[in-house]
Image (tube, rainbow, N blue to C red):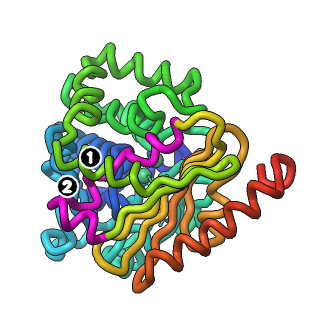
Amino acid sequence: MTKFLSVVSELMSKDNVLVLGHVMPDGDDISSVACLAEGLRRLGKTARAGIDDQIAWYYKLFFAVDKIESFEQLQDFSPDLIVVVDCSSPDRVGRFQDLLKKAKLVVIDHHETNALFGDLNLVDVSSASTAQIVYNINKAMEVSYDPQLATTNLLGIMTDTGFFRYSNTDGNVLRTAAELVELGAQPYFVASTILENRTPEQFKLLEKMIEHMKVEDGLVYSWLSYEDYLSLGCTEDDSSGFVSELRSMKDIEVAILFTEFPEGEVHVSFRSKHWLNVSKIAAALGGGGHARAAGCSYKNVELNKVIDEVLRLTREALAGGRHETD
Ligand code: AMP
Ligand code: MN
Ligand code: MN
């Protein structure tokens, strides 16, 4: 039996399922968690969903996202199966990590840096989003789709492909998206909800990022300190998507954004354009991701020290050139 069919039969055979996503949740993660849990519920199972972090307000405008619960809310649940989606390592589920040992564990993901920490691992690195894998699983389980569920499923595909602009946009992405649109999904709703809801404060934060921006050979980087967020009444969610603005610069290969939120906690977002495998740099620093989009996180650090360390590694990788790093 293929891994895919093993996962489908495992899901079909269990009645109490917990679906978990990662901290700092993005659109693909939220979509995958919400759609898999909803699919199982539509088959009459008890399926609950959890993410141990804040979910940005605009994601809550999508169907089934309001059913994702917090770590505290899920304390009363004893699942007979746990499914972790879009997570490359067990620490990415936050405080749910200790729970992972308490039931059979299925991992569904598309990160090449996946640590294969499940009893069953369905990791398809050729898939642009985890949401596509979830759609295929739901289809195999004969889950009924309506326009609302289809739109939430499309959310993950659209966000992880940069709205069909990134190099991971392939025939499967477009075919699955087309199937979802035929089921009633609304691409316009996804795009306008995610891309056209920036507050004036976010624009001021963007201004700060541009003010701090530095450009050198093949590289553009910038940073936002906790003080920057605080002074504008912003949180880390408000800089979501900013690193893509940096990558849009002409003639650069890699863009890096350093964000400190809250004080002493720094997240590093890497994006590359054509050849540099940034997941290798992120993985060397304890993070992970994809060849063209990766990240890592630090606690109890000084922003400047992180910037120095990351720039040193990135400059080395850039100088190493195309052949050694890709
Ligand atoms: P971001 O820059 O936060 O948008 O993340 C880009 C990609 O890197 C996503 O696929 C994330 O799942 C992955 N990623 C980000 N941060 C981490 C981390 N701390 N550990 C592992 N993967 C990460
Ligand atoms: Mn993700
Ligand atoms: Mn993803």
Location of residue 310 by image quarter: bottom right
What's the residue at 53%, 41% (across, down)? 247
**Disc 1, ligand 2: is the CB inside 8 Å?**
no
Magenta stretch bounds: 226-248
SS class, disc 2: strand
Location of residue 25 by image quarter: bottom left
Disc 1 to disc 2, how far (Cα)?
A: 7 Å
Q: Farthest residue toward the bottom?
A: 300
**Relative depth, front residue between 92 and 311:** 311
CB atoms of marks 1 and 2 within 8 Å = yes
**Relative depth, front residue between 247 and 50:** 247
Residue at image mark 1:
34
Could one spot residue 304 in this view of the protein?
A: yes
Could one spot residue 32 in this view of the protein?
A: no
Three-letter code, disc 1: Ala
State whether residue 243 is above or below residue 138: below
Q: Farthest residue toward the right?
A: 323
Q: Farthest residue toward the front?
A: 211
Q: Looking at the image, tell me whether mark 1 or mark 2 is earlier in sequence order.
A: 1
Residue at image mark 2:
68
What's the residue at 18%, 49% (across, down)? 201
The picture places residue 317, in percent across and down from the top left corner, at 75, 59
**Relative depth, front residue between 75 and 111:** 111
Mark 2, Cα crowd under 10 Å, few <14 / some 14-19 / many 20+, is: many
**Label of residue 168 in the image:** none
Main secondary structure of the magenta stretch? helix
The picture places residue 134, in percent across and down from the top left corner, at 41, 41
As drawn, is 304 to the left or to the right of 76? Answer: right
Three-letter code, disc 2: Ile
Location of residue 311 by image quarter: bottom right
